[in-house]
Amino acid sequence: MMTAAIALFIGKFFIMANKEEIKLDKLPSHIAIIMDGNGRWAKKRGNQRIFGHRNGVAAVRDTVEAAAEIGIQYLTLYAFSTENWNRPKLEIDALMGLLVQTLSSETPTLLKNNVKLNVIGETSSLPKDVAKQLNEVLEVTSKNTGLLLTLALSYSSRWEIIEAVKKIAYKIESGELKAKDITCDQFTDNLTTARIPDPELLIRTSGEFRISNFLLWQIAYAELHFTPTLWPDFRRDDLYKAILDFQSRERRFGKISEQVVTNN
Ligand code: FPP
């Protein structure tokens, strides 16, 4: 009992120490997260995969609150990929149900933290009840001025890139644009993330070292942080650790060390 109390005290001390080490003037403005490991978390406990997804909601809540609190401007969560439509129907239905339920139950948390919701992905393929609930929360939070929380739903980067290419091709077809005038900025403006700066930090949980078709264009210069923590166990302390890791990196953008001002 005594040992547990001491461990809790030491744990709390380190959590606070971590947060206090963060340089608030050097925060990444945009953090993107590949939330992974829900299924394994549930399996380890002898439960169905949806049990892991349900427990992932607490991790989403704590991460969003912590990001808003610390002053992160943009947070993008990979909640459901285009490829996830290939999962068993039972899991897809359960995930969609969980989305509706969570969007509704978490609206007060979003409002309390001045969070504005945004969605990227092929939303036309979402079930009607999910689309309806999403639109409600998008509307209710539309006037918020704090963190922009983007949910990537039915999203994949290759889908997004092809959609951008189509938009540009139509503009060329109609004579609005000349092929020689296509620039990186032009291309960026045709992505679903137009007007959102590129993520400076990308986090992936569960010990996998993959990007899984997420924001491929946008993460060109992102710092990558991989953690073995399974998503349902991810909490604000893990976010602070990722930010500290980010702040320890020297971001050179192709230049040499002497040319850049370090984050330290
Ligand atoms: C990846 O874990 C997780 C998902 C595909 C879904 C993420 C959904 C949530 C966290 C639930 C709520 C989300 C919001 C935004 C309200 P996995 O199933 O691939 O895990 P595994 O790799 O261990 O199988």
Image (cartoon, grey):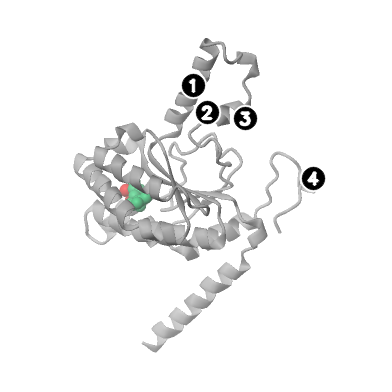
Which residue occupies 59% across, 15% down? 177
Which residue occupies 49% across, 76% down? 12
Which residue occupies 33% across, 51% down? 103
Residue 107 occupies which quadrant of the picture? bottom left
- Give how far apart the Cα atoms at labels 4 and 1 are: 38 Å
Q: Earlier in the sequence, mark 4 or mark 1?
A: 1
Q: Which residue is mark 2?
A: 190
- Give how far apart the Cα atoms at labels 3 and 4 are: 24 Å
Q: Which residue is mark 4?
A: 259
Q: Quadrant of the C terminus?
A: bottom right
Q: Name the front one of labels 2 and 4.
A: 2
Element type at mark 4: helix
Q: Name the front one of labels 3 and 4.
A: 3
Q: In front: 229, or 140?
A: 140
Look at the numbered discs 3 and 1 and tell me whether their residues touch, using CB distance below 8 Å. Answer: no
* Residue 2 placement, left or right of 165: left
Q: Which residue is mark 1?
A: 167
Residue 185 occupies which quadrant of the picture? top right
Question: Label 4 sits on what residue type?
Answer: Gln
Look at the numbered discs 1 and 2 and tell me whether their residues touch, using CB distance below 8 Å. Answer: yes
Q: Earlier in the sequence, mark 2 or mark 3?
A: 3
Q: Name the front one of labels 4 and 1.
A: 1
> How many marks do you count on the picture?
4
Q: Which residue is mark 3?
A: 185
Question: Label 2 sits on what residue type?
Answer: Asn
Question: Label 3 sits on what residue type?
Answer: Asp
Q: How would you rate the neighbour count of disc 4 (Cα within 10 Å): few for under 14, some for 14-19, many for 20 or more?
A: few
